[in-house]
Image: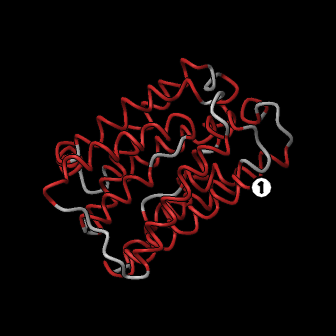
Amino acid sequence: MDWAMAGMEPAAFWAAVAVTLFAGFVKGAVGFAMPLIMVSAFSAFLLPEMAVAGLILPTLVTNLSQATRQGIGAAWASVKTYRRFLIGTVVFILVSAPFLTVIPRMAYLLLLGVPVTAFAAAQLMGVPLALPLRHRARAEWGLGIVGGLFGGVSGIWGPPLLVYLLSIGAQKAETVRVQGVVFLIGAVALLAAHLRTGVADGASLGFSAALVVPAMAGMVVGYRVQDRLDQARFRRWTQGLLVLTGLNLVRQAVM
């Protein structure tokens, strides 16, 4: 097991496995939040570089499953429909990844956590925040770029996509599939970027590979929950989880 533990203590490794199992379950149920949960929890006992590296392969494999759950054709249709968001995300993951070890952790946690919490809380309280359709393309480009900028330095690019999908009123199946597609392509870009920066090396990728198993196990159970949620409950679960994850990011920043 030395190849999987990357020099860390056994307690830290098994804590990472437990966190990943839970994160996979949440992702299976609502389609997102696995990197958010993993990074948030990992920060308590891992260095930021190892935390980001650890989530790369579980993110890639689980999103391949999520993106293709309704077939390759549906996944490809999502690629074409949300191409602006995808391009913005991928390009700016590659741009921002080299700054992982430069940007103060508090800064990017606050910049991500505060707006995500505010948006999701407003939605839960019934405040209409839908984007006007005439601005949809502009919003897609802008939020894709924001997601990419945060994704390269933190491994998290989901909240801007969720903000966009909630704003346009996407249905449950489409929401989950689009998240899988965007996160899958983003995960490939993240892996490529951090192979260049050195964050993803033999030791850290061994650790990341070991986390694929608990991630997929949790996701299979989560799928069963997702299939039982109607559209209204799914939307409320998504909004509530966004509030909690946003608040956790802010908590980490101020502490």
Residue sitting at x 22%, y 46%: 138
Residue sitting at x 33%, y 81%: 232
Q: In this picture, is 154 found above or below 227? A: above
Report the colour scheme: secondary structure
Looking at the figure, which quarter contains the C terminus? bottom right
Q: Which residue is mark 1?
A: 255
Along the line of sight, which residue is nearer the eye, 82 or 126?
126
Q: In this picture, is 48 found above or below 131? A: above
How many numbered marks appear? 1
Q: Looking at the picture, how far across and down is residue 122, in whole percent?
A: 43, 74
Q: Looking at the picture, how far across and down is residue 63, in whole percent?
A: 42, 47
Residue sitting at x 46%, y 43%: 61
Looking at the figure, which quarter contains the N terminus? top right
Q: Amino acid at mark 1?
A: Met
Q: In this picture, is 179 found above or below 174? A: above
In the drawing, does residue 97 fall left or right of residue 14?
left
* Residue at the limit of the structure toward the left, as seen here: 134
Along the line of sight, which residue is nearer the eye, 125 or 180?
125
Hey, which quadrant is residue 247 in on the image?
Answer: bottom right
Along the line of sight, which residue is nearer the eye, 236 or 79?
236
Q: Looking at the picture, how far across and down is residue 30, in whole percent?
A: 43, 66
Report crowding for label 1: few under 14, some 14 to 19, many 20 or more residues within 10 A (C-alpha): few
Q: Helix or strand or loop: what does disc 1 sit on? A: loop
Hey, which quadrant is residue 183 in on the image?
Answer: top left
Hey, which quadrant is residue 4 in on the image?
Answer: top right
In the drawing, does residue 2 fall left or right of residue 190?
right
Q: Looking at the picture, how far across and down is residue 59, in whole percent?
A: 50, 44
